[in-house]
Image (cartoon, rainbow, N blue to C red):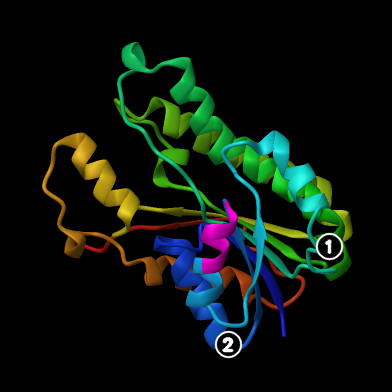
Amino acid sequence: MATHVITGAGSGIGAALAGRLAERGDELWLWARDAGRARELAERFPGAGTLVGDLAVPERLSWALGHQSPPERVDSLLHAAGVVELAPVGELTPAVWQATLAANLVAPAELTRLLLPQLRAARGHVVFVNSGAGLRAHPNWAAYAASKHGLRALADALRGEEAAHGVRVTTVYPGRTATPMQEKVHRQEGREYDPERWLTADSVATTVLTALDLPPGAEITDLSVRPAG
């Protein structure tokens, strides 16, 4: 039975991943921003453990984790949480830049750092659920795309650094996916939201599981998945 730590399990891709891994009988540790959210996740995924810390304030994650009892080994750390705010560069304030980079880049880096001993012990796997915006930036997407380009760089550097410890690192780049975040994006774009046009969260979860389920000695480094048609 593998042990997985998942961020963003409350909705979207993270929730789909948690559901699929729970069905397999694996041990789940779900990251929650506060105690109330932790209770909700524990009710939704019976038997799962929870860890509490606000990813919007990554400098506090070390303190938060130090007051809890994380698993002794981690077979996979799945980064599925994220935030998005669309605006042209001329209208992006430092507050938006800082909030986006904190949640989408600095928090994943810090959480990975804090759990590296457990990942090394398990010769585990770090998966970053990135975005097509991590490969190319479009107008109004500067802050989000910059955070996701940085996340790609983090993954590439981590992969080289941790190969000697047997830790695998994968970045998945989903196209538009039918999630609450995508619904928010459509509102910001002023467009009608039709979830049938986009990937399902379960399709992205299947992509992540494909990377996780490779036999030892094989590693998917980068994997893109797009809506068909």
Q: Which residues are magenta?
A: 34-39
Residue 187 lies in quadrant:
top left
| Real-space CA distance between mark 2 and mark 1, rounded to the nearest whole angstrom | 21 Å
**Which residue is rendered at x = 51% and y = 30% of the image?**
99
Badge 2 or badge 1: first in the primary sequence: 2
The three-letter amino acid code for the residue at tag 2 is Arg
Assign a secondary structure to mark 1: helix
Residue 36 shown in magenta: yes
Q: Amino acid at mark 1?
A: Gln
Residue 24, which numbered label?
2
In the displayed structure image, the side of residue 115 where residue 155 appears, left or right: left
Asked if 94 appears above or below 4 in the picture, the reply is above
Instruction: Residue at 50% x, 70% y: name it.
Output: 17
Residue in the image at 81% along x and 63% along y: 69
* Residue 39 visible in the picture: yes
Magenta-drawn stretch contains 93: no
Cβ atoms at labels 2 and 1 below 8 Å apart: no
Quarter holding residue 5: bottom right
Crowd rating for badge 2 (residues with CA inside 10 Å; few <14, some 14–19, many 20+): few
Q: Which residue reaches farthest left?
A: 192
Q: Position of residue 74 (x, y in %)?
A: 77, 67
Q: Quadrant of the N terminus?
A: bottom right
Task: From the viewer's side, name the closer residue of 164 and 54.
Answer: 54
